[in-house]
Amino acid sequence: MMRDNYRALKAFGIVIVVALLSSSFLGCIGGTQITPDVIKNRGKLIMGTSGGFPPFEVINETTQQLEGLDIDLAQRIADELGVSLEVRDMDFTALIGSVKTGQIDMAIAGMSITDTRNGSVTFSSPYFKADQAIVVKSDRTDISTTDDLAGMKISVNQGTTGDYWVADNLVATGMVAAEDVHKFGYASDALLELVAGRVDALVIDTPVAAAYVANNAGIKVVYTIVTNEYYGIVMNQKSVELVDFVNELLAEMEASGEMQQLVDRWF
């Protein structure tokens, strides 16, 4: 009898462990629902971003804190919810996964809305429009169009639309070797690769390219690649109420002129 009880308890324990593991696994696959009430009860909005992407997110040299258009937008959402804001700075490629697993409530990181990304997360209404730009050192005279990038070494912010554009239009066509594309989790590191002379060009979003040129001597924008991209706030696909809340706020900010004031502050 004791042996039978032991076997039963052991079997029951195995079932419980399997159930817990399955639940955990399915939770990661299915994502996490974050609602405005969940955030309010917690008392803070957890927003993920990726620094070094001016003027959307950049380190303030005095406070050593991130600031920028995206940070202000996140603070506006937190204020509307009546909670504090926690900003988590991470590798750009980690943002979508962090949203899906509920590690962050949303990501605001100058992220373009694409069909591929929409397959795993939900974007808010657009809040900014951008294209891609080619940035080179000021003394370069041999690069002025995309055709001139043939055979060159290029740096990109990994996982961004600039990275994808290079892959689709330069690597896939044989113009640039895959090993000559230097990819970085932070845009600022991609810039440093150009400044250090380890690549011939940087492909990055137009507003960020303009900010880099304005704040770093010795580089210039030589060409704009018209891609007609729109930035959106990234949220979990299950967080329908939060998406609605954010979209309503964005619409109000747009109608009142508050969004334009926010853009004007940083541009």
Image (cartoon, rainbow, N blue to C red):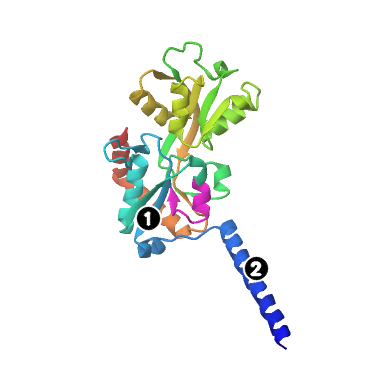
Disc 1 element: strand
The residue pinned by badge 1 equals: 45
Which x, y percent locates residue 147?
A: 57, 17
The residue pinned by badge 2 equals: 18
173 w.r.t. 105: above or below = above
Q: Nearer the viewer, mark 1 or mark 2?
A: 2
For the residues labelled 1 and 2, the Cα–Cα distance comes to 33 Å
Residue at (38% x, 17% y) in the render = 218
Q: Is residue 6 left or right of residue 191?
A: right
Residue at (53% x, 35% y) in the render = 158
Q: Residues within 10 Å of mark 2 (few under 14, many from 20)?
A: few
Q: Residues within 10 Å of mark 1 (few under 14, many from 20)?
A: many
Q: Where are the magenta residues, as a range?
A: 95-107
> Does residue 123 belong to the magenta stretch?
no
Between 10 and 66, the one lying in front of the other is: 10
Which residue lies most toward the left here?
A: 62
Disc 2 element: helix
Residue at (35% x, 44% y) in the render = 71
Marks 1/2 in contact by CB < 8 Å: the verdict is: no
- Give the position of the C terminus as an image quadrant: top left
Which residue lies most toward the front here?
A: 2
> Does residue 103 belong to the magenta stretch?
yes
Report whether residue 254 is seen.
no
Which x, y percent locates residue 231?
A: 45, 40
Which x, y percent locates residue 180?
A: 59, 24
62 w.r.t. 96: above or below = above
